[in-house]
């Protein structure tokens, strides 16, 4: 590994956020998944969760240009909701789902300076009742138009960029955030990956 490459990898790893993740529940379109992955990489999310209990497990993540983000992320795939939610509970203090409900809070009311998992659901049916029942609450992205929905990759991008904004103000990107063992393992793994 060249010194320049090592510096670039260290710069990225030093900004990865252990306290923020995205969960995709039964998202069908692999292009949506790959767009979400690319945005997760852009804001420093290292781990994402893919829960498929109503559709087949994904083998590919979409277009070559977008799917390349997958090799820089840690992707956890689950087919059992309870198992996935239990894994999230071990790492994240709060789990919020995107769902239009009377008790939903605005995205801008969520405190992203803590440890948070955001769940985005299927393109047509949204987040399942089962996942909503196991979450800490629902959130909405404020909208003023006639159509009250966004494409999942857009909704995810808007949401995690709000998290980036809050975490930046709180200084989270100014210090190393990943546990040492994970940091070292990723540095070693990435040292052997081809750059885009």
Image: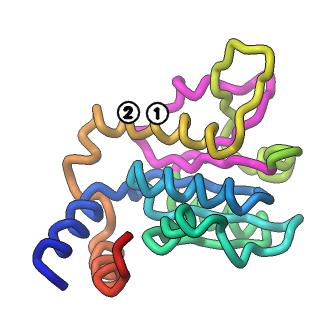
Q: Which residue is tagged 2?
A: 166
User: 66 or 153, which lies in front?
Assistant: 66
Q: Viewed as shown, does residue 102 lie left or right of 63?
A: right
* Residue 108 highlighted magenta (yes or no): yes
Across and down, in percent, residue 128 comes to: 84, 49
Name the residue at 32% across, 68% down.
179
Mark 1 lies on a secondary structure that is helix
Q: Is 113 within the magenta?
A: yes
Image quadrant containing the N terminus: bottom left
Q: Position of residue 186 (x, y in %)?
A: 34, 77
Q: Residue at x 84, y 67 (%)?
A: 53
Relative to residue 75, is residue 123 depicted above or below? Answer: above
Quarter-wise, where is residue 44 in the image? bottom left
What's the residue at 28%, 82% (across, down)? 191
> In the image, is residue 98 above or below residue 11?
above
Residue drawn at (61%, 60%), measured in percent from left and top?
A: 34
- Residue marked by disc 1: 162
The quarter of the picture where the C terminus appears is bottom left
| CA gap, disc 2 and disc 1 | 6 Å
The answer to whether mark 2 and mark 1 are in CB contact below 8 A is yes
Kind of element beneath mark 2: helix
Against 167, is 79 above or below? below
The span picked out in magenta is 93-122
Residue 8 location, x and y as percent? 21, 66
């Amino acid at each position: 590994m060249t010194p320049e490459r090592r510096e670039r990898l260290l710069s990225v790893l030093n900004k990865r956020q252990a306290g923020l993740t995205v969960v995709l529940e039964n998202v069908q379109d692999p292009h949506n998944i790959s767009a979400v992955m690319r945005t997760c990489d852009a804001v420093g999310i290292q781990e994402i969760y893919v829960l498929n209990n109503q559709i087949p497990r994904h083998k590919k993540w979409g277009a070559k240009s977008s799917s390349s983000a997958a090799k820089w992320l840690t992707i956890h795939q689950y087919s059992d909701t309870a198992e996935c939610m239990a894994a999230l509970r071990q790492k994240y203090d709060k789990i919020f789902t995107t769902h239009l409900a009377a008790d939903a809070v605005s995205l801008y009311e969520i405190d992203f300076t803590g440890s948070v998992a955001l769940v985005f659901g299927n393109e047509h049916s949204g987040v399942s009742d089962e996942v909503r029942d196991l979450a800490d609450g629902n959130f909405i992205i404020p909208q003023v138009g006639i159509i009250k929905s966004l494409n999942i990759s857009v909704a995810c991008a808007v949401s995690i960029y709000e998290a980036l904004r809050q975490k930046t103000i709180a200084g989270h990107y100014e210090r190393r955030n990943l546990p040492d063992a994970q940091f070292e393992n990723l540095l070693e793994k990435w040292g052997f990956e081809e750059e885009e």
